[in-house]
Image (cartoon, rainbow, N blue to C red):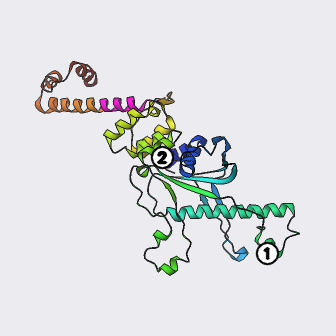
Amino acid sequence: MGLKDTVTTKYMRQNKIFADLFNYFIYSGEQVIDPGSLEELDTREVDVPYGGKEGARQPVQRTRDVIKSVIAMKDRRTAYLLLAVEAQSNIHNAMPVKNMVYDALQYAKQVSNAAASHKRSGDYKETDGDEYLSGFMKQDRLLPVVTVVVYFDSKEWDGPMSVHEMFGEQDARILALVPDYRINLITPAAIREGDFEKFQSSLREVLSFIKYSQNADRLGEVLEMDEGFRHLGRAEVDVLNACVGAKLAMKENEEAIDVCLAIQKMKEEERISTLLKSIRNLMEKAGWSAEQSMDILEVSESDRKEIRILIG
């Protein structure tokens, strides 16, 4: 797992962030999913292919980024769900198949768990042969699995959104018989400006920063308007640095930074670095002293003090 995958998965694993994502995606920002109701599950999805002793012996195993169970209350109705996140820093052109496998393995696990539960309790005795053979009784129910892909990049997602898109040209009569699978996708570039207000966690700052990371003027406006950027945490900074090269510096003992000040400081350091390079170039090629070079470039007195220290 690369740095981008590591920091984004770690970030999305936080219950507050995870709940905020699904409250935005499913409930349009309404606070239905309580972070305290989330329970993290094993991210490994394992299933033994059907076929018995003569079939495939090697289990199929895939590892999700994050999956949690949740009890959501909406209009006095209770929903038991399994929610999963796949954090992507790059476009995955086989994402529909990847997620379809994850979800299928999760459903297969639920069926296997139901069969094992019935076997332990011995309640197959009153069932018919069909229920016994399938291991899944008529009153058994599956928990829905909702998987959301979060694309941590400023570019538009141009990969396939469904399995059908991956087939190419096909007879419509054939496609009508092949179940489709579509991915659920959140990409900063596609989030409308007013919709960022629907986020109640630092996802608002992280995703809006990514969206405008290639537009310095608009990013500056967003930083000034959003108070959340005044105290952005280490996990958020790690994501921005890894995914869009934000170059935000944090000291080891710092838990949060003011992004506006950090960027101003970074720009100032770049300005001084460029000025210093010009001075050294004049010193080398024209044979002038540092003071003569600064005179020619009309360097201010405040900048001269800093440059003298750097030149040594």
State the residue in front, 119 or 293: 119
Mostly what secondary structure, the magenta segment?
A: helix
Q: Are marks 1 and 2 in contact (CB under 8 Å)?
A: no
Q: In which quarter of the image is residue 110?
A: bottom right
Q: Which mark is residue 130?
A: 1
Q: In this view, does 268 lie to the left or right of 171?
A: left
Q: Quadrant of the C terminus?
A: top left
The residue identified by callout 2 is: 3
* Quadrant in which residue 62 is drawn: bottom right
Q: Nearer the viewer, residue 172 or 237?
A: 172
Mark 2 Cα shell of 10 Å, populated few (<14), some (14-19), many (≥20):
few
Looking at the image, which residue is at 43% across and 44% down? 194
- Label 2 element class: helix
Q: Is residue 120 left or right of residue 198?
A: right
Disc 1 or 2, which lies upstream in sequence? 2
Q: Going by the image, does 191 lie left or right of 127?
A: left
Q: Where is residue 76 in the image (x, y as percent from the top left)?
A: 69, 48
Magenta region, residue range: 257-269
Q: Where is residue 188 in the image (x, y as percent from the top left)?
A: 43, 49
**Going 31% across and 39% down the picture, which residue do you hit?**
217
Q: Report the residue at 66% width, 73% height from top.
A: 56
Q: In this view, does 182 lie to the left or right of 218?
A: right
Q: Position of residue 265 (x, y in %)?
A: 35, 29
